Amino acid sequence: MDRGRQEARVTETTDTEHDAIIIGAGFGGLYALHHLRDEMGLRVRAFEGAGGVGGTWWTNRYPGPRVDAPSSPFYAYTFSKELVDEWTWKETQTAQGDVLAYLEHVADRFDLRKDIEFDTWIVDARYDEATQRWTIETDAGQTATAQFLVCAVGALFVANMPDYPGIPDFAGECYHTGRWPHEKVSFAGKRVGVIGTGSSGIQSIPEIAREADHVTVFQRTPQYALPARNRPLTPEEIARYRHDWADLRTSMRKRGGWPFATNRRRASDYSKEERHAVYEELWEKGGIHLSIDSFVGVLVDEALNEEVSEFVRGKIRDIVRDPETARKLMPDYHFGTKRLILEGGYFETYNRENVSLVDLREDPIEAFTPEAVRTKQGEHPIDVLVLATGFDAVSGSMRKLDPKGRGGVSLAEKWRDRFDTYLGTTIAGFPNLFMIHGPGSPGVFFTMPLGGELTTAWIADCIRHLREQGLGAVEATEDAEAAWDREISAIADRTLYPRTNSWYMGANIPGKPRQFLGHLRGSQYFDRLTEVAEQGWEGFVFEPARDHPS
Ligand code: NA7
């Protein structure tokens, strides 16, 4: 059906009846709103708990947050050439404030704000089998209904709060990096304790150390972190990006999210010294190049992985002057199997007089007092506690939303033992519900803005199919979910990822089911989405429209 006819079929709605409800106004939700409303002509309403757009870029305001993947100009929307031409990124690793400013610009440019309800949390979402519609309820007691529920609720949103004994009694200031206040937090003259050394800890610790009287880092797992080598983008780079935008966009889609041709060289064709020279070159180049561009199979071949791991350990030993501190900082898991961290002066920070490191593996936290952290070996008085302890990643925000599907079954119940989805976008028992960056999708393993665009386009195709065929509901089958689980697990099992306790595996949250939460081959994944659609929406069942006006 052509778009004109499509638009003619738009449901006549009241203020609380929509074709689609979107939850979340981060990268994924904003694009979904634009696409479903402006490209498809649907009546759409978005709901966002925060006071503005941005999602993760709204909440993560700790000192020093930056994009920690290959960043500008690639960590951005690709759908609009005009947008590409009018927005000028400043640095290679974009700072949080600049990403947020970009998303605010996008919201204004595409006139999105008028259809977003800010400061509004969804407290209930229920599917009604009779009307084939979802009803949501907000924390203000409002209700709204829509045929489709699009959950763009964020892969890294639900804060992981440690439950050490006495922590609620700590009397000083306490901040989680993912829930940082909007006002500036002053560390001047204060003793700061930081728990956690993931991206958020590693980005914020050098910044805090520059200002605080003393910083004590409480480290559970030492990390491989590669130099980000952030620098200003040159006018020539920006011009080239704009000129080559169409090709780069295609290249990103085909090469796992980034337009870099990765090296196909085989480690066995090189001597140990030659390989070392390659690692040195890529270390100097910075960013994730050491991981993706050295030799084929770094994340698959244990011996090769160990060689790269040892190379990075050597760098840490070279940088950190105190051998005892350097020893505590030695990572021992397989390089790259936890989220790779890009840093700017993290290891050097341990050469400062005002920074000390507690290795929780040998000196665990026993309890908090109102003024201090008490570990097995001593007491560490602090004024400020920074929890850089991450998130109940990927599945956490959907579980928190806890929609109720067919027969009133809650998602929390369905996902008690395993996060079953079909294609990472749909869930059996939850008709007409779509996820962006859900468990089983490439999510953080692909450029998230582009991943969101491609996923939304597929969701839109599915909705178009329903409308064209006069259908009322689409639902994944349990068989399709089981097959999808096998498919994505098989991809992960061929790598070293599942051997490491990481948030990719759900291992950072006590009691969380252990399961690899992503699809590691983003380009292949988007091919699969297309294939499913082309093969008559394989793995889905459709119901004729019952209560649908079209
Ligand atoms: P991460 O990457 O999950 O890091 C959290 C850190 O906090 C990590 O070092 C954890 O150790 C540590 N942690 C978590 N719980 C505890 C407790 N209870 N005690 C001590 N240490 C703990 O979150 P980030 O916010 O840094 O980064 C998340 C993503 O956001 C990142 O990939 C970027 O894309 C942006 P562990 O390693 O689990 O042993």
Image: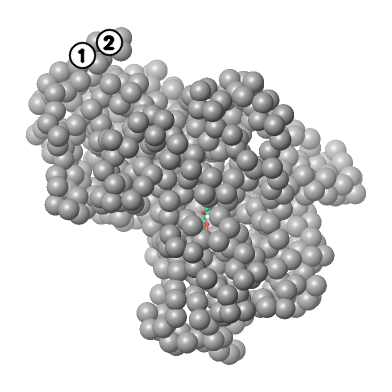
Q: Residue at x 14, y 44 (%)?
A: 143
Mark drawn on residue 8: 1
* The image quarter in which residue 362 lies: bottom right
**Quarter of the figure with the N terminus:** top left
Ligand 1 near label 1 (Cβ, under 8 Å)? no
Q: Secondary structure at mark 2?
A: helix
Q: Residues within 10 Å of mark 2 (few under 14, many from 20)?
A: few
Q: Position of residue 444 (x, y in %)?
A: 51, 44
- Report the residue that reaches farthest toward the bottom: 378
Going by the numbered disc 2, the residue's amino acid type is: Gly
Q: What residue is shown with label 2? A: 4
Q: Position of residue 321 (x, y in %)?
A: 80, 72
* The image quarter in which residue 461 lies: top left
- Nearest the camera: 176 or 550? 176
Q: Position of residue 471 (x, y in %)?
A: 19, 21
**Quarter of the figure with the C terminus:** top left
